[in-house]
Amino acid sequence: MARVACFDLDNTLIDRDGAFLAWAEWWAQREGLGSEGVEWLLAHDEGGFRARAELFAGVKERFGLSAEVSAMVDAYDHEHPRFTWVEEPVLKGLASLRTAGWRVAVVTNGGSVQQSLKLEHTGIGAAVDYCCISDAVGVRKPDARIFKIAAAQTGATLAGGWMVGDHPAYDIAGGIAAGLSTVLIGDHHPSGATPTHHFASVLQAFPVVLAS
């Protein structure tokens, strides 16, 4: 039976923080907030983990914006994905795994609208066998059930599989709980569960998974 290779999306397959900066610069200019607005957004974003309603409630209060928070959040969910991109070597790495017989899944925590648009805009959705978005399946990493869903949807087994991601508490601890080998990408978050490997770039993970 085929094995599954699971990948996180934000700050793993794509540069989420870079995309957020690009969006913040565009949005702050549009709203007339200037560099101060950009700096405020970056300081309060918390790497995307701060609830968007809280983030926009804060920026509304700080800069006296008139728009409703819910409207700003909805607009953000549709706007931010347009600022994401994927490097061609990443798509080639995903393709190499599928060519070698692996089932490849994106396993990401987040809202269905924004994550689906990111996957579509970057082309990653079409480059993998299945995209497992927590909001859509009702389970979030590190719950091992989300990895079981990904394996089942791709017709693969978790045995001998991998989880590659940037968050020790969600990606690495979750992958370990599901019986997967793990690769931690970058140093975006405080240390936690110990991964099988730790690399600066997801590109370094592809040959390791292929060789396993």
Image (cartoon, grey):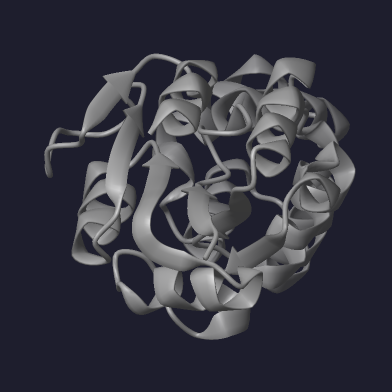
> Which one is nearer the viewer's eye here, 19 or 98?
98
Which residue extends farthest bottom?
Answer: 138
Give the residue displayed 64% in from the left and 32% down from the top: 20
Position of residue 39 measured from the top left corner of the image (x, y, whole percent)? 53, 22
- How far from the left and from the top, in percent, is residue 69? 66, 66
User: Taking 99 as reference, is 168 left or right?
Assistant: left
Residue at the far front: name it: 1
Left or right: residue 40 compared with residue 154: left
Image height check: is 52 above or below 123? below
Q: Position of residue 47 (x, y in %)?
A: 43, 38
Left or right: where does residue 198 sit relative to residue 120? left
Considering depth in this image, is 47 or 133 the residue closer to the camera? 133
Residue at x 50%, y 30% (from the top left corner): 210
| Nearer the observer, 129 or 102 | 102
Report x, y in % for residue 81: 78, 45
Residue shown at the point (77%, 43%) measured from the top left: 124
Residue 199 can be seen in this image? yes
Relative horizontal placement of residue 84, taking residue 18 as reference (left or right): right
| Residue 192 in which image quadrant | top left
Q: Can residue 187 be seen in the rendering of this structure?
A: no
The relative height of residue 177 versus residue 163 in the rendered view (above or below) is below
Up the image or down, 208 lies above or below 136; here it is above
Residue visible at 43% across and 26% down in the picture: 211
